[in-house]
Image (spheres, rainbow, N blue to C red):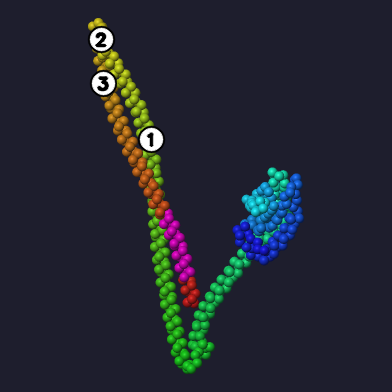
Amino acid sequence: MMLFHTDRKPLKYNLVIISVSVFQLILTQFCTGQSQLIGASQPIVATFVVTLAGLETTSSGVVLQCESKGWNPEPEVLWLDGEGHVLSAGPTEIVRGPDDLYTVSSRVTVDKRHGNRFTCRVQQTIINQTRETHMQVSDDFFYVQSSIFPVTVGLVVSVAVCILSFLAIVLLWRKKNSSKCKIRQLDENDKGQRNICFKPGKTKDQIFIEEKGERETLMVDKTEQMEEMDGKRKKKKNKTSKIHQKKEEAEITVKNLEEELETKRTEVENKESELQQLHEENQEREKNLQTVKDKLEAKNKELQTVKAQIDQRRFTSFSKETLQTKKTVVEKEVETLKKQLETMETESQTRITEIQDKQADVQRLKDGIQKMETNQQMNDNTEVHLSTFTLEYDLFTDVSLVQQQTLIL
């Protein structure tokens, strides 16, 4: 029998497989023997099978499965812990057989906090029949996954690190030993000693001449490598100097942008304050303008009334003179109000134009601020990129120079 995790992957540990298999056999026998009928006796014969479906990989839980056959009508399945509390289980699978009897199956994931004793209850309320079975889960099954998996992962990682370290040490040792061997041979030849690397069939003078040429070639190679390293150091120094210079320029640019941005923001605040003041003054002027219009309308009505009274010709000469005088006064007042109204409308139009100009200035300043903030963000990113590049470049160059120097030595 193969057990599976809840993600359908097989268990990889023989010990876990054997333990779970034995537990499943014991649990199946135990649960079959513990099932019991509760309620009125019915002619339906239902069977119980309770198995350990697998282990939960993330929470070290145990997955239990309960299956019961031979029901009609279809029943419902409940899982209970040792204290009788209902547990949250997955959806119940219901299959109807050719004999019109139903088979129900349900799974639940339990852990140590639910206790060790669990109950699977299958009930049919219509016919008032309930069957249930009890099971006992050992504590060992709650910890078998969590105790083995971290140890295995740590062991695999440790072995991999040891292998890589060993390979690196062997390679370095071989390179160093090869270089030492060549230098040792040349030194021994200078002293007139015989070297184990001598080729047969050559005289001592021939070997000495050949090794002298090899020694001179090796010294030339070392000199060239040292000069190349010096050139790389100078190139690195120049490159680093240029990068630092660009970084300083970027920092100065960012600082200037921040100061200019702060100035623009202050200017926007002042413009908005002036704009708000202009709006308030314009509202007050509109009120005064409306008051003058109301007065002018009242005077026009009064003038029309006086004209109508004069046209009626039912008054004495004194009354007509009085009305004429009143008409003249009213006409002058009307003319004065008209001039005042024209002046106020002109001022109002001027103020409106000024407000529109202020609004355009504020919008232009806001657009400028947004553009400056974008430039500032780009400069900040450039500065971070330069800092990262400088650090990586210095580290890479230092490692390369150290490796070359090690090979030369």
82 horizontally vs 354: left or right: right
* Horizontal relation, residue 241 to residue 11: left or right: left
Residue to which mark 1 is pinned: 276
Label 2 crowd bin: few (<14), some (14–19), many (20+), radius 10 Å: few
Residue at numbered disc 2: 312
Dot 3 or dot 1: first in sequence order is 1
User: Residue tagged by mark 3?
Assistant: 335
Magenta span contains residue 393: yes
Q: Is residue 338 above or below residue 111?
A: above
At x 65%, y 49%, the residue is 88
User: In the structure shown, which secondary structural element does the residue marked by tag 1 occupy?
Assistant: helix
Q: Is residue 154 left or right of residue 199?
A: right
Residue 115 percent across, percent down from the top left: 71, 52
Label 2 is placed on what type of residue? Gln
- Gap between marks 1 and 2 measured at Cα: 55 Å
Q: Secondary structure beneath disc 3? A: helix
Q: Which residues are magenta?
A: 380-400
| Amino acid residing under circle 3 | Glu
Tell me, for residue 349, which label it has, or none.
Answer: none
Label count reads 3
Chief secondary structure of the magenta portion: helix
